[in-house]
Amino acid sequence: MLPDRALASMPSPAARRVRDVFDAMKVATRVENKKVLVDLAPSVARGLLLKEGKQGEPVPMRASHEAYFDFRYQGDYPEMYELYRRAVQNQWDGDRQLDWSTDVDPQNPEKPVFPIELVPMEGLAAHGIHLDHAEQMRFVSDFSCWLLSQFMHGEQGALFASAQVTECVRWTDGKFYGATQVMDEARHLEVFLRYLESKLGKLYQVNDNLFTILDALMRDSRWDMKFLGMQIMVEGLALGAFSMMYQSTREPLLKEMLRYVIQDEARHVHYGVLALKRHFAELSPRELREREDWTFEVACLMRDRFLAHEIYDEWFAGHMTRPQWDQVMSNSPFLTQFRQTMFKRLVPNLEYIGIFSPRIRAHYDKVGLTQYAGGRNASELTAEDLLAA
Ligand SMILES: [Fe+2]
Ligand SMILES: [Fe+2]
């Protein structure tokens, strides 16, 4: 690893590039299972090295899955059909049911979008950085825009992934359900985009780790990997994040929007665990092991995505190094709680669908992500539970 001194002497775009290469190498060297490495490497190159999500151009991704037709139309998964009926009955209209006349000021201390505790004051002070009150409010505002932008980009991924999954899922009842999720995700993308554009006035580009995951999911030909990546990982973590955001925001329009979105997302994760519980029961030990390894790597990518390098580049590049910033973010009490809430929702689902063996659990232990094992999984949680969490 190059010493920080050497990086400090480089012009900042060059130093940033070197850091990106090291980040990509870190992912590559951590992955122990070579098959997982081969699967993820092209997406890591496109996301972390080429930064295809940040070029300001549309990004074509070639999908290679099979559409699965079944002309027998059997009632093959009653619990999924039941979810479909519930989804149809609970469709909502973001234009009519949310009050878009609400006056939102992201720097208003009375109704903050997110609390001021979001600012890692102590961590920044350790590096000689002191933000005055106005700067703190501006930081919270920018960070809120960054966070919500990432969830919005995730919603675009969920829209495409749910469309792909609807084509390739094996159960007719799953296809009925999948179609409702496509509509849900379109609505989520619509309301997040509208909120960011018309109320907060700032959009951030997609985070490289998130791009890497989306790229891997879109191109993977195996339907259950799309399911695992999107329904269980991306959506499961988003659900935890939305619950915490719902609890901590004092901004009424965002709170109401999240209340609607959480109810939809609870169904999406429930669909994911129903499908994979049944499918994984039929896989060989080797196939299960591969899915366990893949999931662990994606979990690490997802955790690191919240290091918010886009915010670092905008606010603190030149004042501290990126590893120092990573440390500040890792130790921030607010973000620590945020990460914990997210993984609290994920780990019980991995246990339920059968990809949390003692072997892989040891890996999760090492990165501090096992404390929520044994909790309630998505099939046991209602939307009310999630709103109260
Ligand atoms: Fe969504
Ligand atoms: Fe979703």
Image (cartoon, rainbow, N blue to C red):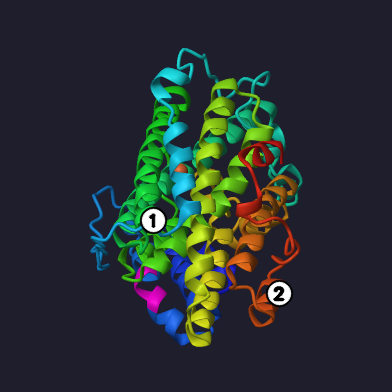
Rendered view: 265 above or below 346: above
Give x and y (percent) for residue 84: 43, 44
Name which residue lies at 66% across and 61% down: 348
Rendered view: 31 above or below 226: below
Q: Amino acid at mark 1?
A: Gly
Q: Is residue 55 magenta?
A: no
The quadrant of the image that shows the C terminus is top right
Identify the main secondary structure in magenta. helix
Q: Earlier in the sequence, mark 2 or mark 1?
A: 1
What crowding class fits label 1: few (fewer than 14 Cα within 10 Å), some (14-19), or many (20 or more)?
few
- Which residue does the numbered mark 2 point to in the structure image? 366
Residue 308 visible in this rendered orientation of the protein: no
Name which residue lies at 31% across and 51% down: 163
- Which residue does the numbered mark 1 point to in the structure image? 75
Q: Amino acid at mark 2?
A: Lys
Give x and y (percent) for residue 139: 59, 35
Rendered view: 29 above or below 71: below
Q: CA distance from mark 2 to mark 1?
A: 44 Å
Identify the magenta region.
39-43
Q: In this orientation, which residue lies closer to the viewer: 144 or 172?
A: 172
Rendered view: 295 above or below 286: above
- Label 2 or label 1, whichever lies nearer to me, is 1
The quadrant of the image that shows the N terminus is bottom right
Element at label 2: helix
Question: Is 354 displayed left or right of 12 in the figure?
Answer: right
